[in-house]
Image (cartoon, rainbow, N blue to C red):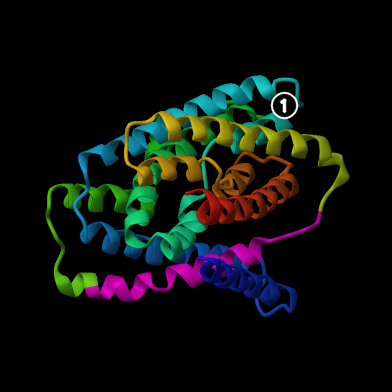
């Protein structure tokens, strides 16, 4: 376990080093993330779900993820209610949704293998609905133009999410005990092997340790809210739910993951002037979640 974490940290550091010596730039992360989201991550999902039959109890994971999303943004409304409108909108967008695909998948794959990917993949179905739905709506509502949401636009966002569509289709096939042709799975297996190193290098590219003092108070407030919420509700679900340990561990760990990077694109779309704050909070969450996941994987779970 410790050796796997060491390799993970080394690859992340390689990504950061490549940025520092200008072999890669942070803007290259957009291209790499497109490759991950549209090619390597879907391939990994297909391979993982094709090799097993989804248990009926796992259907509860996306349901729980969806419910948690609503609870978190409801509480965030009261926690951040006194903030200036655009700052409040930023924090509300970042209050819900978790970085499962880019952050959790490479770590889960290294620690728990295919079994862990299935559980986290099921959680990410509900999580994706929250990220592209609830978080997007919050960002739209608090933007300067106010709520400009079009239901058809949200549906299009869902349909254009290759990982989400892959989760759903591959999940239905697995639940129905229908397997894809072996040649297709062999090809997907080869492609899926690139997901781990690419995801970790991307995390390294996005690491940025610049900090603006004007955002100190909202930064502390946000971090306390996010990880306080994650610990309280994660531990409650872990000890109270009548499911197997991997199921309960998935929820606990998922609630301690960093915020999804899609918030950056939402902020750009709604013309938020808080891109640096979002980047700072995302990086703090990445470091915090790495430490938490290491502790849980080695000493608790």
Q: Position of residue 39 (x, y in %)?
A: 38, 66
Residue sticking out furthest to the front: 299
Task: Indicate the quadrant where residue 208 lies.
Answer: bottom right
Task: Indicate the quadrant where residue 145 lies.
Answer: top right
The dominant secondary structure in magenta is helix
Residue 93 to residue 282: above or below: above
- Between 107 and 155, the residue placed more toward the observer is 107
- Between 81 and 57, the residue placed more toward the observer is 57
User: Which element type, helix, strand or loop, lies under badge 1?
Assistant: helix
Q: Position of residue 255 (x, y in %)?
A: 52, 40
Task: Indicate the quadrant where residue 240 lies.
Answer: top left
90 in magenta: no
For the image, the number of numbered tags is: 1
Q: Which residues are magenta?
A: 186-210
Residue 17 horizontal side relative to residue 53, left or right: right
Residue 48 to residue 99: above or below: below
204 in magenta: yes
Query: Circle 1: is it few (<14), some (14-19), or many (20+) Cα within 10 Å?
Result: some
Q: Which residue is mark 1?
A: 85
Image point (12%, 52%), residue name = 177
């Amino acid at each position: 376990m410790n050796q796997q974490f060491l390799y993970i940290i080394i690859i992340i550091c390689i990504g950061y080093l490549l940025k520092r010596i200008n072999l890669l730039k942070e803007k290259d992360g957009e291209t790499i993330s497109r490759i991950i989201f549209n090619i390597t991550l879907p391939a990994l999902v297909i391979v993982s779900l094709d090799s097993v039959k989804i248990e009926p109890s796992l259907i509860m994971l996306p349901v729980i993820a969806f419910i948690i999303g609503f609870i978190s943004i409801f509480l965030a409304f009261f926690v951040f209610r006194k903030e200036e409108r655009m700052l409040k909108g930023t924090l509300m967008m970042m209050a819900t949704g978790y970085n499962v695909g880019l952050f959790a998948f490479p770590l889960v794959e290294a620690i728990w293998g295919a079994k862990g990917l299935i559980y986290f993949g099921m959680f990410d179905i509900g999580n994706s609905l929250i990220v592209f739905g609830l978080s997007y709506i919050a960002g739209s509502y608090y933007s300067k133009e106010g709520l400009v949401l079009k239901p058809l636009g949200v549906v299009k966002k869902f349909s254009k999410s290759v990982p989400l569509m892959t989760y759903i289709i591959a999940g239905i096939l697995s639940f129905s005990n229908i397997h894809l042709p072996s040649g297709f799975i062999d090809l997907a297996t080869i492609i899926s092997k690139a997901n781990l190193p690419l995801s970790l290098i991307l995390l390294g590219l996005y690491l940025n340790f610049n900090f603006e003092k004007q955002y100190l108070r909202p930064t502390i407030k946000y971090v306390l809210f996010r990880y306080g919420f994650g610990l309280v509700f994660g531990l409650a679900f872990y000890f109270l739910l009548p499911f197997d340990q991997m199921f309960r561990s998935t929820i606990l760990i998922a609630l301690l993951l960093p915020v999804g990077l899609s918030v950056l694109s939402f902020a750009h779309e709604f013309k938020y002037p808080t891109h640096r704050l979002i980047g700072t909070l995302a990086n703090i969450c990445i470091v915090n979640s790495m430490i938490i996941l290491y502790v849980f994987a080695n000493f608790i779970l």
